[in-house]
Amino acid sequence: MSAPLLSCRDLSVTFDVNRRGAWPWTPPMKLRAVSDVSFDLAPGECLGVVGESGSGKSTLARAIVGTVPTSGGRIVFDGTELSSMSPRERRRHRKGVQMVFQDPLAALNPRMPVGDIIAEPLLTHHPDTPKKEVKARVQEMMERVGLLPNLINRYPHEFSGGQCQRIGIARALVLKPRLLICDEPVSALDVSVQAQVVNLLKELQRDMGLSMIFIAHDLSVVKHISDRIVVMYLGRLMEEAASRPLTTRPRHPYTQALIASVPIPDPVLEKARVRPIISGELPSPLNPPSGCVFRTRCPKARPDCAEGIPPMLEPEPGHFVACPYNEVQDVLAVADEAREKVT
């Protein structure tokens, strides 16, 4: 088995938050956005990251890119630990890890033509590149993402949301990175455009041999593109498995609730599906629950869930879950039973 391209071990990210209305000398509160997250990403693999808003998905992505400082743990990219990198190695790290952002229009400079936007990373890391080569590389990337090269002098406001996201993808890939991190790249787009962008990313990953981290809150989108999926809640990992086992045989109550929230167009299956009862709202990350962070909303919570953070268990090979009371919910079996009743 090949060595992982990216390895995170016990990764934590903590922010200082000033208390509103407090005295200037009052110490800030600690907000732990990511807590003890560990996973590996193999070369050419796509890892999906799902969870509600506030679960720490975007902070995790920014920590890997290096735009957010970590407060604990290790990030190893291509055999080199991020914290031990020299300035030159960090520059090379940024070249090898690129990011696609959520809001396509806000991520583009409105005063720059598309050609300059796509060329900017290339000129930043390789300022001596001849103009003719830069233009050729930009036109190549525009064609790869489905944009006509004759649009090279247009400005972002002249494009649709889906086209702007294609520009953002072209900009991220112009350096030919080894890892592409997509932070909710389709959440601001129409459903029909979402499918086009997801299919484009799958095609680019296959053709360019990319590793990818795909972040979203919609599990139906993530399972379409990902080889493996990790589920996050309040900064912690709840479950990790290959895409199909996780979406058809989820074990953690939170994962089961996420899957139940995805609508099914078949009314028979929609009526027959099991819906876990999740109560309350997402707790404040400034004051998370003790023990299991999901226990205050979990339908299977027990008194001992408050006593300690549950370890990651492996009830099946390659399927990890942070719940000692996990049970398989066979989504396919429920669907087959519902169809048999109708027929």
Image (cartoon, grey):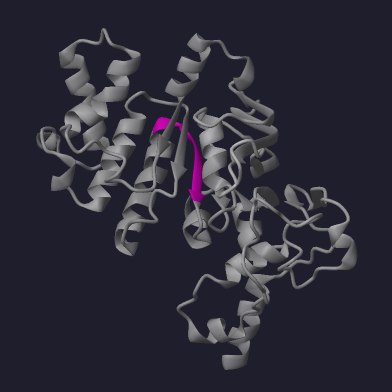
Taking the image as shown, residue 246 lies to the left or right of residue 47, namely right
Taking the image as shown, residue 309 lies to the left or right of residue 341, namely right
- Residue 241: % across, % down: 67, 51
Q: Nearer the viewer, residue 305 or 132?
A: 305
Considering every residue shown, the one lying at the far front of the view is: 23
Residue drawn at x 49%, y 85% as measured from the top left: 267
Image quarter hosting the N terminus: top right
Taking the image as shown, residue 297 lies to the left or right of residue 122, namely right
Residue drawn at x 77%, y 49% as measured from the top left: 317
Taking the image as shown, residue 330 lies to the left or right of residue 120, namely right
What span is colored magenta in the figure?
A: 208-215
Residue 300 position (above or below residue 186): below
Image quarter hosting the C terminus: bottom right
The answer to which quarter of the image holds residue 86 is: top right
- Residue 216: % across, % down: 49, 53
Residue 12 position (above or below residue 159): above
Residue 318 position (above or below residue 87): below
Residue 244 position (above or below residue 9): below
Q: Nearer the viewer, residue 110 or 94?
A: 110
Considering every residue shown, the one lying at the far top of the view is: 128
Residue drawn at x 59%, y 27% as measured from the top left: 5
Q: Main secondary structure of the magenta part?
A: strand
- Residue 27: % across, % down: 67, 38
Residue drawn at x 55%, y 47% as measured from the top left: 57
Whether residue 268 appears in magenta in the rendering, the answer is no
- Residue 294: % across, % down: 72, 61
The answer to which quarter of the image holds residue 202 is: top left
Residue 94 showing in the rendered view: yes
